[in-house]
Image (cartoon, helix red, strand yellow):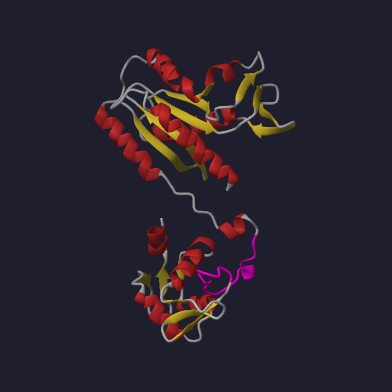
C-alpha cells in the first residue's frame, strides 16, 4: 500500500506540470500494462505526439538520491539511513524495448521513443556519479518537464504521425492494456482458511451478524440491516474470487440454508453463468458500485 500510495502521489503531483506542455498535440496514457514475450511490462505514463513518443517513469522519493553507474543502482539516504533501489533508468529502458517491439509488430516502427525518469518529491536532492552521463540526461525533476520536452521537440522537428494515426495508436495501446488484478491472498501469502467468514456489523465493525427473517442483526449492538451482506461479498470479490456459487456463498456468509442464499443472490440481480447446480454468480458489479 505504501508503494502504491507513493506512486499515486507522484502521478498526482506531476499533473500540475502537464499543463505547461503543448495543448491539443499530446495524448496521455497512464498505467499501461501490456503482455509481451510471456511477461507483462508496465509504463507509468506515455506521451504521444506527432514527432516522438516519451515514456515517463515516475518516482516519488524523498531524501538524497544518488544515481551510481558502476553497479547501476539508485542509493537513497534519508534520516541517516542508506538504502538501494533498482535503477529506474534501466527500468524505463526495458519498457522502451518492449514498447518498440509492440510498435514493430503493428508496423509503427518509424516512431522514435524517448525515456525520462521524473523525480516528483519536492524535497528530493538528486545527484549522479560524474561518469553517469545517462542519468544526467534522463533524470529530471517535475519542474524541468516543460524544458525537457522543448529540447526533445527540437531534436525531432519532423512530424511522423498524423492525428488519425495518434488516435489509432492510443486505441491500440488501450486495447492491449491489461488491468493488474492479483490474487491478494497469494501475493501476501495468506491462507484463505484464515479469513473470517460472516457479515460484519457496520457499527461494531468486529461483531458477526446473524440473518433472520430477511434482516441481518447484530447480537452485540442490536443493529439491523437488509444489505450488510453486500460489503461482505465485496470483500470476497477482492480477496478470494469475483465468482461465487450458492454453496460457497452460504458458507462464507454463515447462512443456514441454500434457500436463504439463493434469495440473497437473486435479490442483487447479479449476472451469472451455468445451470442451476453449477451456477456461478459474478460479483464485478458490486466492486464497480463501490468504486
Q: Nearer the viewer, residue 68 or 106?
A: 68
> Left of 38 or right of it: where is 68?
right
The percent coordinates of residue 169 (x first, y second) are: 33, 35
Is 55 placed above or below 237 here? above
Is residue 44 something one can see in this rendering? Answer: no
Image quadrant where residue 166 sits: top left
Q: Residue at x 43, y 77 (%)?
A: 278
The percent coordinates of residue 14 (x first, y second) are: 45, 31
The percent coordinates of residue 155 (x first, y second) are: 41, 13
Q: Residue at x 52, y 22 (%)?
A: 140
Q: Residue at x 47, y 68 (%)?
A: 233
Q: Nearer the viewer, residue 118 or 244?
A: 118
Image quadrant where residue 100 sits: top left
Q: Nearer the viewer, residue 238 or 183?
A: 238
Figure disc tally: 0
> Left of 281 or right of it: where is 116?
right
Which residue is farthest front? Answer: 221
> Left of 192 or right of it: where is 218?
left
**Magenta residues, dominant SS class:** loop
Is 171 placed above or below 197 here? above
Q: Quadrant of the C terminus?
A: bottom left
The percent coordinates of residue 49 (x first, y second) are: 34, 26
In reply to whether residue 201 is colored magenta, the answer given is yes
Q: Nearer the viewer, residue 47 or 51?
A: 47
* Region rendered in magenta: 190-206
Q: Residue at x 42, y 32 (%)?
A: 15
Amino acid at each position: 500500500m505504501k508503494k502504491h500510495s507513493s506512486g499515486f502521489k507522484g502521478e498526482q503531483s506531476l499533473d500540475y506540470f502537464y499543463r505547461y506542455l503543448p495543448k491539443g498535440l499530446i495524448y496521455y496514457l497512464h498505467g499501461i500494462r501490456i503482455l509481451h514475450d510471456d511477461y507483462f511490462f508496465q509504463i507509468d505514463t506515455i506521451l504521444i505526439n506527432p514527432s516522438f513518443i516519451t515514456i515517463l517513469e515516475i518516482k516519488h522519493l524523498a531524501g538524497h538520491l544518488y544515481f551510481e553507474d558502476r553497479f547501476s543502482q539508485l542509493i537513497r539516504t534519508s534520516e541517516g539511513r542508506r538504502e538501494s533501489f533498482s535503477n529506474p533508468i534501466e527500468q524505463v529502458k526495458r519498457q522502451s524495448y518492449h514498447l518498440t517491439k509492440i510498435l514493430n509488430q503493428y508496423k509503427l516502427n518509424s516512431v522514435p521513443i524517448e525515456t525520462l525518469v521524473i523525480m516528483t518529491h519536492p524535497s528530493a536532492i538528486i545527484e549522479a556519479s560524474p561518469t553517469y552521463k545517462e542519468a544526467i540526461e534522463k533524470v529530471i525533476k517535475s519542474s524541468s518537464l516543460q524544458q525537457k520536452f522543448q529540447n526533445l521537440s527540437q531534436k525531432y522537428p519532423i512530424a511522423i504521425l498524423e492525428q488519425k494515426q495518434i488516435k489509432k495508436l492510443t486505441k491500440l495501446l488501450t486495447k492491449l492494456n491489461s488491468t493488474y488484478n492479483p490474487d491478494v491472498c497469494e501475493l501476501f501469502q495468506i491462507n484463505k482458511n484464515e479469513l473470517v467468514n460472516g457479515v460484519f456489523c457496520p457499527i461494531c465493525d468486529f461483531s458477526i451478524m446473524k440473518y433472520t427473517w430477511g434482516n441481518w442483526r447484530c447480537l452485540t449492538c442490536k443493529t439491523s440491516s437488509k444489505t450488510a451482506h453486500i460489503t461482505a461479498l465485496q470483500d470476497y470479490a477482492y480477496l478470494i474470487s469475483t465468482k461465487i456459487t450458492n454453496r460457497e456463498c452460504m458458507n462464507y456468509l454463515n447462512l443456514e440454508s441454500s434457500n436463504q442464499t439463493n434469495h440473497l443472490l437473486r435479490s442483487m440481480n447479479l449476472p451469472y453463468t451455468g445451470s442451476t447446480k453449477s451456477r456461478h454468480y459474478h460479483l464485478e458489479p458490486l466492486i464497480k458500485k463501490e468504486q
